[in-house]
Image: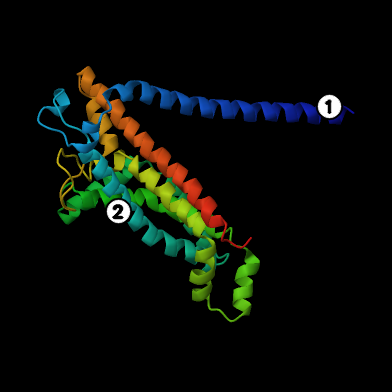
Amino acid sequence: MKRSLLWKIEEAVMKGLMIGALVVVLGCLLLILSTVLRKGLPAMNLTMLIQAPKGGYYTGAEGGILNAILGSLYLALGATLVAFLLGLPIALHLQVYAGHSRLVEVVHLSLDVLWGIPSIVYGAFGFSLMLFLGMRASLLGGIIALSLVELPIMCRAIEEGLKMVPFELTESAYALGATRWEVAWKVVVRQGLPGITSAILLAFGRGIGDAASVIFTAGYTDNLPSSLLRPAASLPLAVFFQLATPFPAVQQRAYASALVLTAIVLTISVLSRRASEKLSRYVVK
């Protein structure tokens, strides 16, 4: 009787903690969204989305943030492509070829450490590498640094998606005479498409919102991205530079830029969920 009462108390406490955590998370999200909407919507207009900054933009002159929107998309798309081309083979090797060897533990530990490293460290490393190679701040430098930020996220997320492939399915393929290569690409990858898609969109969302890794490597410019070897703007840095000005009108534009960035990230999150649900229909469970 006494033990039953203790269990009920423990269950009530844990339920209260879970509800409290949910309220805190949702409250923070709503607070962020309401702040960005309240301060950003008054400054939002079509000009901001279709024009680059003009002379005196940071003192209140005309123009927009098209340079930062395109720069962020180019940076995130390029970095996500590089991270995917490197991350998929790593995840496949860990899941299909490596088995339960000591190497798997070492790689997992390395990826976890890389995931925890602040992005500013990747930016500093990328900057040092660019100096060694004689490169200047450029779109290419930003893509390289940002791909390092995304790589551990991509690897771990893809691997978790591949783990959802039923063990019996791969064993059946081996029993039918399939090689490891055929099992990896024709069974594991196809069945793991929902997880792979989620990993790609998750890494892209992480990349498009990062500022520290590109401030030294991609630089910043008011011009539209025109070359891999030219500097490129990004939305996080656009928010930073606009908030740093003493002009209220420009600071309000910073919140409008933050609103655009938030809308992109939310869209990516929704697309990730929808894509995973749609692809899951064709997965053997």
Circles 1 and 2: CB atoms closer than 8 Å? no
Q: Is residue 103 above or below residue 75?
A: below
* Image spot of residue 85 (x, y percent): 37, 61
* Image spot of residue 268 (x, y percent): 41, 44
The disc at residue 22 is none
- Mark 1 and mark 2 lie on one chain; the one further toward the N terminus is 1
Q: Element under label 2?
A: helix
Tell me how many marks there are. 2
> 125 or 94, which lies in front?
94
User: Splitting the image into 4 quarters, where does residue 23 fall?
Assistant: top right
Quarter of the picture holding the N terminus: top right
> Given the image, on which type of amino acid does mark 1 rest?
Leu
Q: Residue furthest bottom?
A: 177
Q: Element under label 1?
A: helix
> Mark 2 = which residue?
78
The structure residue drawn at horizontal position 47% and vertical position 26%, both measured from the top left corner, is: 30
Q: Residue furthest left?
A: 55
* Image spot of residue 157 (x, y percent): 49, 52
* Image spot of residue 179 (x, y percent): 53, 78
Classify mark 1: residues with Cα within 10 Å, few (<14), some (14-19) or many (20+).
Answer: few
Instruction: Classify residue 156 as left or right of residue 6.
Output: left
User: Splitting the image into 4 quarters, where does residue 267 fall?
Assistant: top left
Q: Residue furthest right?
A: 1
The structure residue drawn at horizontal position 75% and vertical position 29%, both measured from the top left corner, is: 10
Q: Is residue 177 above or below residue 124?
A: below
> Given the image, on which type of amino acid does mark 2 rest?
Gly
Q: Is residue 38 visible?
A: yes
Q: Is residue 156 visible?
A: no
The disc at residue 5 is 1
Q: Is residue 171 above or below residue 57?
A: below
The structure residue drawn at horizontal position 22% and vertical position 29%, both measured from the top left corner, is: 241
